[in-house]
Amino acid sequence: MAGDGERLVQDLLDQLNLEALEQRLFRGSSRDIGGKSVFGGQVAGQAMVAATRTVDPAQQAHSMHGYFLRPGDMQAAIVYEVDNIRDGRSFATRRVQAIQHGRPIFSMLVSFHVAETGYTHQMAMPDVPGPEELTSHDELRHAWVDSLDRVPESLREAVGREVAIDMRAVKPWNMLDPDEREPVQHVWFKAKAPLPDDQALHRAVLTYASDFGLLATSLFPHGVSFFTPGMQMASLDHALWFHRDLKVDDWLLYAMDSPGAQDARGLSRGLIFNREGQLVASVAQEGLIRQREPQPKKDP
């Protein structure tokens, strides 16, 4: 498993190491992690890398706001075009367009800030069991697939596909047999292998990882999931704020909730804490949760 983790993390780092085509123009490739189109976290993470390469290294990303415009084609390269919106003494702003087949699939604004001192406060980290006491999402997914004979082979492959991020939920949610529950979840996560000591890279990897599980939180009260027949789901936007330096190769707690859903859209939020209880990032996302066909009744 350790070797697999190192291979998966290296593959993620390769994805984030964009090819420079021209000044402020980059190209990236995609990986199939079991969805129908390019994983939104991958596009956001690559866009973050593209933007970061155009600013002073003394400035770190402190916020990003992105919109997913079209599904990404996993078989085609993605070109990232960076516009220099502003360079100030403390802040810099970049706009990134991710383009495939001549059309934008993702658009993002990123703001960068030099480190400085100021007032500090935060909410307390939730009191939950530590990651060492929990089962990894990889192990749970394999068990879920093996226990459901009705799951088609193609779905078994999609659900069983592993990623570079180790995730351990405090109260696991079976996406193949979802129950109805309060729209709240707590998930510990970290990269499956050490990362280079590069804060900009850690923030790009966090951007990638912050898309896992967030939208699903808005489905909890309804007992449905991405794999429910007739369910159409897609991230519509994604916002992320970095509050302090962080390490994604050490355990982080992702505390997520969904305050509401309406008009086939679900809103999800998240707070990310390190092991010391420091708030390192905040996240918000709205996503499409459209039931296109009547939901089949579950067996009693």
Image (cartoon, rainbow, N blue to C red):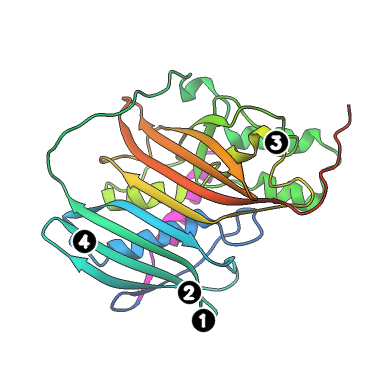
- Comparing 33 with 114, the one in front is 114
Which quadrant of the rendered structure holds the C terminus? top right
Q: Are marks 4 and 3 in contact (CB under 8 Å)?
A: no
In space, the residues marked 3 and 1 are separated at their CA atoms by 38 Å
15 horizontally vs 273: left or right: right
Residue corresponding to mark 3: 222
Residue reaching furthest to the front? 263
Q: Residue 252: x and y, percent?
A: 40, 33
Q: Dot 3: within a 10 Å radius of its alpha carbon, few (fewer than 14), some, or many (20 or more) residues?
A: few
186 horizontally vs 224: left or right: left
Q: In this view, does 208 lie above or below 56?
A: above
Instruction: Please state which amino acid type lies under the numbered disc 4.
Output: Ala
Of marks 3 and 2, the one in the foreground: 3
Which comes before the other along the chain, label 3 or label 1?
1
Instruction: Please state which amino acid type lies under the numbered disc 2.
Output: Ile
Magenta-highlighted residues: 1-20
**Tag shown at residue 92:** 4
